[in-house]
Amino acid sequence: MIINHPKLGPRDAAEFTILGDASMLNRPDWQADNADDEFYTYVYLRDNPAGLHRELWFHEQGDRSWLVVTRDTITHDVVDVSLASNVALAAKSKKVTKTLNTKKTREKLKSKGQNR
Amino acid sequence: MIFKSLVNSIIPSDLMSKSSGKLHSSVLQQKKSFSLLQCLQQSNFIVGHVIARVDMRYSIWSLINQALTGNQGWKPAWREPEPKKNYQIIIIGGGGHGLATAFYLASRYGMSNIAVLEKGWIGSGNIGRNTTIIRSNYLLDGNEPFYEESLKLWEGLEQDLNYNAMISQRGIINLYHSDSQRDAYVRRGNAMRLHGADAKLLKLEQLRNMCPFLDFENARFPVMGGLLQARAGTARHDAVAWGYARAADQRGVDIIQNCEVTDFIIKDGACVGVKTSRGTITAGKVGVAVAGSTSRVMAKAGLRLPIESHVLQAFVSEGLKPVIPGVITFGAGHFYISQSDKGGLVFGGNIDGYNSYAQRGNLPVFEDVCQSGMAIMPMIGRARILRNWGGIMDMSMDGSPIIDKTPIDQLFLNAGWCYGGFKATPASGLCFAHLLARDEPHEVAKKLRLDRFRCGAMLDERGAGAQPNLH
């Protein structure tokens, strides 16, 4: 398999090690009330699809970057590759905008601005 | 002498002169019109009828009978029935485990209204893709009694099934390469013996006598000795599937091939049947034993499981004269090898490591496996590899299997065999049959629970944690 590294170009998959399902990027909140259920799901349960699968690969014998690789588990075709850090940051900013968009936070920010 | 006794029993006694054991002269005189062959065929007609009465039981007599009648009388080893509308129990998956489950349900739990549904043809999955090793050299209390039960069933399997599965207890040796590894093997050997299995620690000199071809002075991983389980060995994997299929079929089990389960019928939280490519079939209970396809099938019932599907490759070389006495495994890498009765070296190593539903792997692991082989037995370096293939392993989160009920009533699961499914076939079938028939786990499978991941009662032989590709 060839993994098309976003920064280094096409590299042999043998340079990488695989951790598993990219859902592992979404670590649950350990303080939540249902944290035990969430962590059970997070640590042990997998979709394990036949078809496209997003997974975490580590460029161990290269630039040591973490990648999110979208790969077909039936054909082994690599469909998409991106830096895991970018994926995580994008998810984080999405979460932030989500919190920004709630009514409460908007009002909070408003009142903060008035105080200034 | 053997031939004489065969002739004695085939040729009706009035044609034989009992005192001399030779053909009576009058028969010899009639040779022109009544040849010996005709005579044998005629008498075989009688023998054949006797055999037909015991439902085509395979024996030396059926073999001789067929040999002398041009092999025209062999019947298909199992029927190809149309699916009925309803069964007491449906087993999804016509592999080794599914067929074994059906066989034990019929033979030990007295059930007969059973169907085995297989998407392709029986034995088309991992039962025909493994490296044929049977053994019970496990450490943990939750595992060892189960695998020992399995090995005991292997020992009587051919008689139970009336089928030659070419079971050969030629022994397995796990090599150790360091002091700490020897200590670990001593511990494992003791655990095995405490559960009634056999284990023997081989010192260097004993091992040299048994396997002089090993690279004892390997600079990186010198061979220091091995853990021997003499009762372990190999079996012909296809014959195991066929034997179970035939024996189950004879006890009334419907084996339905080319029948893909497309959905479960779930009413009020209980599974009452399945939709298939050959119509809807209702059932009292449904058992799923589909190995690598477990997640795919169980997703239809809305379940997510602690399982990932991975590809494991296996390899076979050209046929050689006998060189490897039993099964040998490399302790410092992951490599196991045995020699088939045909002479081919059958070997394998690690899984590829990434999720896969393709029954083929990639070259880096191919190379790694061959390097591991060369590290312990450089003599195989010039053997040419004939074939390699892959199978899809249902890798569980702790490396141990699951035989349990599911959150859905009347739906039962047999999965998570990682790459140890073949050796477990008989006990897996027996314990799954027990669960299906009695609604409670078999004594030796009590710890193979589905909820052990939630409650923390893990069976992690390797201590690798929740990382399926490391088990």
Image: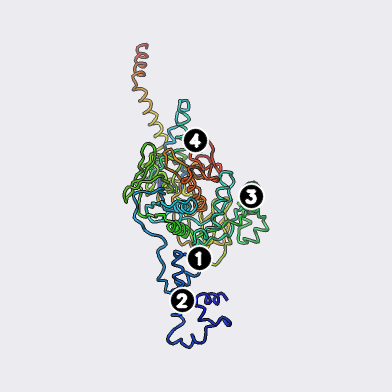
Give a yes or no on whether discs 4 and 1 share a subunit: yes
Residue matched to label 4: B454
Q: Position of residue A87 (x, y in %)?
A: 39, 34
Q: Position of residue B359 (x, y in %)?
A: 41, 52
Give a yes or no on whether discs 1 and 2 share a subunit: yes
- Label 4: how many residues lie within 10 Å, few (<14), some (14-19) or many (20+)? some
Q: Secondary structure at mark 4?
A: helix
Residue matched to label 1: B342
Instruction: Report whether residue A1 is seen.
Output: no
Residue matched to label 3: B193
Identify the chain of the residue marked 1, using the numbered disc in the image: B
- Label 1: how many residues lie within 10 Å, few (<14), some (14-19) or many (20+)? few
In the rendering, which numbered label is found on residue A15?
A: none
Give a yes or no on whether discs 1 and 3 share a subunit: yes
Which of discs 4 and 1 lies nearer the camera? The answer is: 4
Q: CA distance from mark 1 to mark 3?
A: 33 Å
Foreground: B77 or B298? B77
Name which quarter of the figure residue B255 lies in.
bottom left
**Outermost residue toward the top in this view:** A115
Which of discs 4 and 2 lies nearer the camera? The answer is: 2
Identify the chain of the residue marked 3, using the numbered disc in the image: B
Give a yes or no on whether discs 4 and 3 share a subunit: yes
Label 3 is placed on what type of residue?
Arg
> Does label 1 or label 3 sit earlier along the sequence?
3
> Does label 4 or label 3 sit earlier along the sequence?
3
Give a yes or no on whether discs 2 and 3 share a subunit: yes
Label 4 is placed on what type of residue?
Arg
Which of discs 1 and 3 lies nearer the camera? The answer is: 3
Q: Position of residue A90 (x, y in %)?
A: 38, 31
Residue matched to label 2: B43
